[in-house]
């Protein structure tokens, strides 16, 4: 049996470790903070804490709060355009697997031309190589199921073609830093924590 393994992401693990984000070597000076289109990041205080940490590090930030539970290609395209318009130089993905998955697509479309499906290898994707390096990503996970905070892949849905398919793969899409703070997961309802456990098992 042969295999290769490469996990370049710096993982910060522990209760309260989000409070040390400002001490890290962050990959830019203006962050696009990506969250879901729900309210949990705001009501739990995770968004305010993250923005405060970025401010302590001397980093400006803007928020993109459009990510669905099954993130859409159109949302990723909008996020990439927003990141360019706001002159963001890195992404902070604050949320579960859907947010982190879509952030990889946003990071790609912020620096590359055309359509996201140009760079998808399965289905109706055009399987083109990604010409320009995506924006770097810092992943702050609020769930424990997907592992998206330490891999270069995401799952994106395309309503135009009725496809839900994997996207990514290049080393440049590995998050630079993964913040795994169990305190951020305490607000998740127990039933969803159970689902996430099964998700991790099946992965």
Image (cartoon, helix red, strand yellow):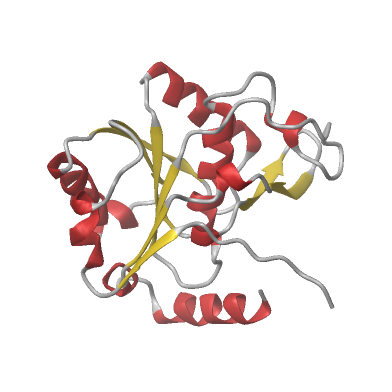
64 lies above or below 146 = above
Whether residue 203 is visible here, answered yes or no, is yes
For the N terminus, the quadrant is: bottom right
Q: Which residue lies furthest to the left in this view?
A: 56
For the C terminus, the quadrant is: bottom right
Compared across the picture, whether 72 is left or right of 22 comes to right
Image x and y of residue 141, in percent = 41, 61
Image x and y of residue 130, in percent = 69, 31
116 lies above or below 3 = above
Image x and y of residue 32, in percent = 36, 35
Q: In which quarter of the image is residue 55?
A: top left
50 lies above or below 82 = below
Foreground of the two, 148 or 45: 148
Image point (18%, 48%), residue name: 53
Image x and y of residue 126, in percent = 84, 31
Image point (51%, 28%), residue name: 80
Compared across the picture, whether 194 is left or right of 139 comes to right
Image point (50%, 43%), residue name: 103
Whether residue 45 is visible here, answered yes or no, is no
Foreground of the two, 39 or 144: 144
Count of marks, rendered view: 0
């Amino acid at each position: 049996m042969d295999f290769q393994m490469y996990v370049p992401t710096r993982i910060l693990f522990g209760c309260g470790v989000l409070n040390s984000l400002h001490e890290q070597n962050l990959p830019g000076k203006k962050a696009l903070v990506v969250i879901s289109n729900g309210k949990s990041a705001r009501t739990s205080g995770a968004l305010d804490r993250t923005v405060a940490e970025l401010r302590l590090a001397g980093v400006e930030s803007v928020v993109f709060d459009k990510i669905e539970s099954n993130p859409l290609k159109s949302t990723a395209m909008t996020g990439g355009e927003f990141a360019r318009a706001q002159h963001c130089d890195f992404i902070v993905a604050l949320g579960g697997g859907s947010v982190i998955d879509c952030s990889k697509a946003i990071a790609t479309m912020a620096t590359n031309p055309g359509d996201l499906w140009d760079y998808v290898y399965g289905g109706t994707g055009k399987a083109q190589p990604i010409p320009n390096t995506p924006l770097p990503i810092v992943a702050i996970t609020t769930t424990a199921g997907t592992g998206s905070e330490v891999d270069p892949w995401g799952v994106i849905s395309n309503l135009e073609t009725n496809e839900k398919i994997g996207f990514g793969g290049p080393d440049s899409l590995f998050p630079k830093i993964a913040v795994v703070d169990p305190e951020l997961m305490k607000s998740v309802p127990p039933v969803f924590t159970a689902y996430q456990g099964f998700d991790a098992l099946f992965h």
